[in-house]
Image (tube, helix red, strand yellow):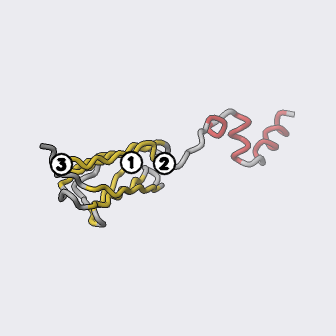
Amino acid sequence: MRRKLRSAVATLPFALLLVLTGGAASNAQAITSPAVSAWDCDPGGSLIWCAITVEGGVTPYTYEWYKDGVHKAQFTGHVLRLGCTPGRDVRIDVVVTDAIGQRISAWAVCTCVRDWQ
């Protein structure tokens, strides 16, 4: 009997074997796509400050920031801080990529305000 059982198990698909043995497939969690959980842009004085918070996906994340379509390679974290011209609209875009290549993007148009006096 034991011999027959071994040969029967050997013909089962691998995924089914993992479930039957309590392996990784039964403990695996679904990977969700990254999503923006918070986006904040604050145009104050002659600076514009933006921050993004991302949830889901697989960490670590990489960030690509753009100001009016121009890539700002010096900013690689979740925060951007740049100079701006008071009274002028500025478009800020960010593309976030997770560790397995899933991408999301967000953007905002902010009007840079004059310095407080």
Q: Which residue is mark 1?
A: 61
Query: What distance separates the C-alpha of mark 3 from that of mark 2?
Result: 32 Å
| Residue drawn at the location 31% of the way across and 57% of the way down | 65
Q: Determine whether 67 is above or below 46 in the image.
A: below
| Residue drawn at the location 24% of the way across and 58% of the way down | 73
| Label 1: how many Cα within 10 Å (few below 14, some 14–19, many 20+) | many
**Front position in the image: 31 or 21:** 31
| Residue drawn at the location 34% of the way across and 52% of the way down | 63
Q: Which residue is mark 3?
A: 45
Q: Amino acid at mark 3?
A: Gly
| Label 2: how many Cα within 10 Å (few below 14, some 14–19, many 20+) | many
Query: What distance separates the C-alpha of mark 3 from that of mark 1?
Result: 30 Å
Q: Quadrant of the C terminus?
A: top left
Q: Which residue is mark 2?
A: 34
Q: Nearer the viewer, mark 3 or mark 1?
A: 3
Q: Position of residue 13 (x, y in %)?
A: 74, 49
Q: Quadrant of the N terminus?
A: top right
- Tell me whether circle 1 and circle 2 mark residues in contact (CB < 8 Å): yes
